[in-house]
Image (cartoon, rainbow, N blue to C red):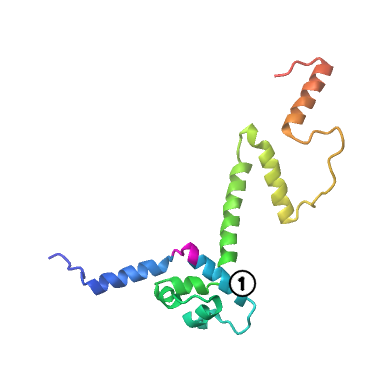
Amino acid sequence: MAEKRPTSTKAIKNIVEVATSLEFLPSEKDKELKASFWALERENPTCDPDLLTACRVAEVVNYSNMEKKWAIPGFREWFCNKNEAKQRAERIFNKLLDALDNIASSDDPKAYSAQLAAFKALGEYLGHLGKSNTPPPLGLPTDQKELEALVASMQKRLGVAGD
């Protein structure tokens, strides 16, 4: 005998609520409200995100429909996460590290200058390289094009045929 699945509208509604609360997707207006609120309240020692209410937020940002927003599954959790910007920055930084990794492992000669820039940026970030404000010595190539011109010039002077 086949197992009977619950089909009540209440069960389906509960499943939908749980699913949507797992990943609330804010609108631009939601983002503006959150940014406005936390810009004013971030340093307020009495503002505890765990105790935040729709009334308090509505008061601070002067938004009368906050109760409706607060009732949307996932909205309150998203709104009260004042570390979201740091978390997003870390996520983006990790994506950039992946991109650097792809650049660094490329065998494409066109990617060499990007590789050098990536290695330099990563080396500076990790403290392996000091930041240099001194320009390269005069006469030395500063990019791939200048290097190729210098090599061609040297080959011509030495009478060596280029590739």
Q: Is residue 135 above or below residue 72?
A: above
Q: Which residue, as the protein is rendered here, is positioned at the far right?
A: 138
Q: Main secondary structure of the magenta part?
A: loop
Asked if residue 140 lies in the magenta stretch, the reply is no
Residue at figure coordinates x 80%, y 17% from the top left: 156
Residue at figure coordinates x 38%, y 67% from the top left: 20
- The x, y position of residue 87, in whole percent, is 57, 64
Asked if residue 27 lies in the magenta stretch, the reply is yes
**Numbered label tally:** 1
Q: Is residue 83 visible?
A: no
- The x, y position of residue 148, in whole percent, is 74, 27
Provide the secondary structure element on which disc 1 rests.
helix
State left or right for residue 58 relative to residue 118: left
State left or right for residue 120 relative to residue 12: right
Q: Is residue 150 above or below residue 26?
A: above
| Amino acid type of the residue tagged 1 in the rendering | Ala
Q: Is residue 151 above or below residue 39?
A: above
- The x, y position of residue 88, in whole percent, is 56, 62
How busy is the neighbourhood of tag 1: few (under 14 within 10 Å), some, or many (20 plus)?
few
Name the residue that disc number 1 marks. 39
- On the rendered image, what quadrant is the N terminus found in? bottom left
State left or right for residue 19 relative to residue 142: left
Q: Which residues are magenta?
A: 25-29
Residue at figure coordinates x 20%, y 69% from the top left: 7
Q: Is residue 145 visible?
A: yes
Q: Nearer the viewer, residue 83 or 6?
A: 83
Residue at figure coordinates x 57%, y 56% from the top left: 92
State left or right for residue 32 relative to residue 152: left
Q: Nearer the viewer, residue 3 or 7?
A: 7
In terms of image quadrants, where is residue 71?
Answer: bottom left
In terms of image quadrants, where is residue 111?
Answer: top right
